[in-house]
């Protein structure tokens, strides 16, 4: 006999609509497979008069999320509004009411997961968050369940669909950054406020969640190094191409021999021959290296209505199946008292650095001199002439640098900035020889 359960949805935007449509379209399939019948009983929205898709359950709408959480017909609460304040109150109230939560809110869990997972434990009520990382790719359950027997050595991934889409459109269609971002917003990939997509934080929040599951301790976002794609320009993409690389916003999580965890997010040059270089558009991919499983690659759509709804629906069914059972995992149970993050200054890669310099004699020599003084090797340098403005006073000058400590590079770049021939902060990309 099927178990009948009521869902309360908080947020009926792109993903909420996708959840509603998927549950309707595949109702029989879901109930045949899982023996649960789930129905959306209440939906909290910001604007009740907004036009909605045909057939939307307008009679179940309210503007008060607490009505949804405390409705007796609601057994499971799905939080899809994003943000870290009201969303926190909704999730906390649901857990206190003993109602399992399904959320796709990576910012909330990365920033305030410690408090919420503690509440989850206290009230013996789970939080499911498959949709929080990499859209439709089932990477959270993989980390929680399938890889439970592995020591995770590294996870390297492209986990923000919006920035990956922007980079691809800049690369293949030569679009300007703003134009490509506008397209990503139109397609429903970007967050309501796309700042977090392009400044690297959406990807970093996801990397924090993956690292938390892999290493068993909560990570303070303030300790994590994050750079976004806002400063990527056509010239960088062209250079990468010329050198056999592709520009990607890459998250790197790695356990070092001394137990330190390296975690960082930044635009990077990755070899055009590596499988991650062909992850384009809204697609995401995470390469996980486990001591038992070896390398596994997870690939799929990282954002958008239906792929994200796929993960939310899977979590709803899991929550429904778990209702009434005590214990089980609650999303995340810290199993390490603490762990140590590697200081970003101690991380090492080769680099590509773009300087905006005054076009005057001796500039290359001055920069090269400062690098040589620091013991940083140069593997290549170039200064393309702007064909539209060959006599410009300012030019871009790029340097490819050999592997060195990031801390040393930062100190040296500061010194170069003081030489008087550089007009703005140098732009640094990591070169990842994956
Ligand atoms: N804005 C996010 C992205 C959505 O572009 O990846 C999925 O988390």
Image (tube, grey):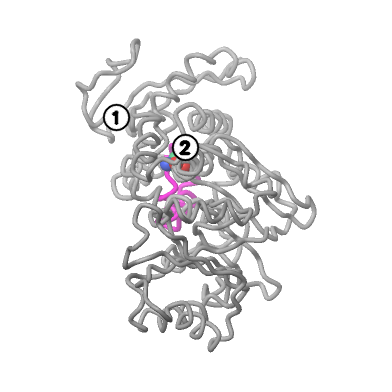
Q: In the picture shown, does residue 63 fall above or below 166? A: above
Q: Is residue 283 magenta?
A: no
- The numbered mark, 2 or 1, whose residue comes first in the sequence reads 1
Q: Nearer the viewer, residue 260 or 236?
A: 236
Q: CA distance from mark 2 to mark 1?
A: 40 Å
Q: In the picture shown, does residue 364 fall above or below 119? A: below
Quadrant including the N terminus: top right
The residue stretch that appears in magenta: 98-125
Quadrant for residue 77, please give it.
top left
**Which residue reaches farthest bottom?**
373
Percent x, y of residue 393: 31, 68
Say which residue appears at 34% left-offset and 49% top-offset.
Answer: 195
Say which residue appears at 58% left-offset and 19% top-offset.
Answer: 30
Percent x, y of residue 302: 52, 38
* Ligand 1 under 8 Å from disc 1 Cβ: no
Residue denoted by label 2:
173
* Ligand 1 under 8 Å from disc 2 Cβ: no
**Which residue reaches farthest front?**
391
Say which residue appears at 58% left-offset and 51% top-offset.
Answer: 241
Q: Residues within 10 Å of mark 2 (few under 14, many from 20)?
A: few
Residue denoted by label 1:
44
> Does residue 165 show up?
yes
Percent x, y of residue 324: 55, 33
């Amino acid at each position: 006999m099927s178990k009948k359960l009521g869902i309360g949805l908080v947020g009926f935007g792109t993903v909420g609509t996708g959840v509603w449509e998927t549950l309707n379209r595949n109702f029989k399939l879901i109930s045949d497979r899982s023996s649960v019948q789930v129905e959306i009983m209440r939906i909290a929205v910001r604007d009740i008069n907004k036009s909605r898709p045909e057939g939307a359950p307008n009679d179940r709408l309210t503007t008060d999320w607490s009505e949804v959480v405390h409705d007796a017909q609601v057994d499971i609460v799905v939080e899809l509004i994003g943000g870290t304040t009201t969303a926190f109150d909704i999730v906390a109230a649901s857990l206190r009411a003993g109602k399992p939560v399904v959320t796709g809110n990576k910012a909330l869990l990365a920033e305030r997961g410690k408090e919420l997972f503690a509440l989850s434990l206290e009230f013996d009520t789970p939080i499911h968050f498959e949709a929080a990382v990499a859209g439709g790719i089932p990477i959270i359950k993989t980390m929680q369940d399938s890889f439970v027997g592995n020591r995770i050595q590294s996870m390297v991934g492209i986990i923000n669909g919006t920035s990956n889409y922007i980079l691809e459109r800049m690369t293949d269609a030569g679009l300007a950054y703003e134009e490509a971002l506008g397209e990503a917003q139109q397609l429903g990939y970007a967050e309501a406020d796309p700042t977090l997509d392009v400044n690297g934080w959406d990807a970093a929040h996801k990397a924090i969640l993956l690292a938390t599951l892999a290493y068993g301790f909560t990570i303070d976002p303030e300790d994590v190094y994050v750079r976004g794609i806002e400063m990527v320009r056509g010239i960088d993409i062209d250079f990468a191409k010329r050198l056999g690389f592709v520009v990607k916003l890459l998250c790197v999580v790695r356990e070092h021999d001394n137990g330190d965890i390296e975690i960082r997010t930044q635009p990077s040059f990755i070899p055009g021959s590596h499988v991650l270089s062909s992850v384009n558009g809204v697609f995401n991919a995470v390469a996980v290296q486990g001591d038992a499983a070896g390398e596994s690659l997870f690939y799929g759509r990282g954002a958008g209505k239906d792929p994200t709804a796929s993960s939310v629906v899977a979590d709803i069914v899991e929550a429904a199946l778990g209702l009434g059972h005590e214990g089980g995992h609650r999303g995340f149970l810290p199993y390490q008292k603490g762990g140590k993050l590697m200081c970003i200054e101690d991380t090492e890669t080769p680099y590509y650095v773009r300087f905006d310099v005054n076009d005057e004699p001796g500039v290359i020599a001055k920069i090269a001199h400062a690098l040589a003084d620091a013991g940083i090797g140069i593997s290549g340098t170039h200064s393309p002439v702007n064909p539209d403005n060959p006599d410009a006073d300012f030019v871009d000058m790029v340097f490819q640098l050999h592997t060195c400590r990031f801390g040393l590079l930062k100190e040296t770049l500061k010194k170069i900035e003081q030489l008087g021939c550089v007009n703005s902060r140098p732009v640094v990309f990591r070169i990842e020889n994956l």
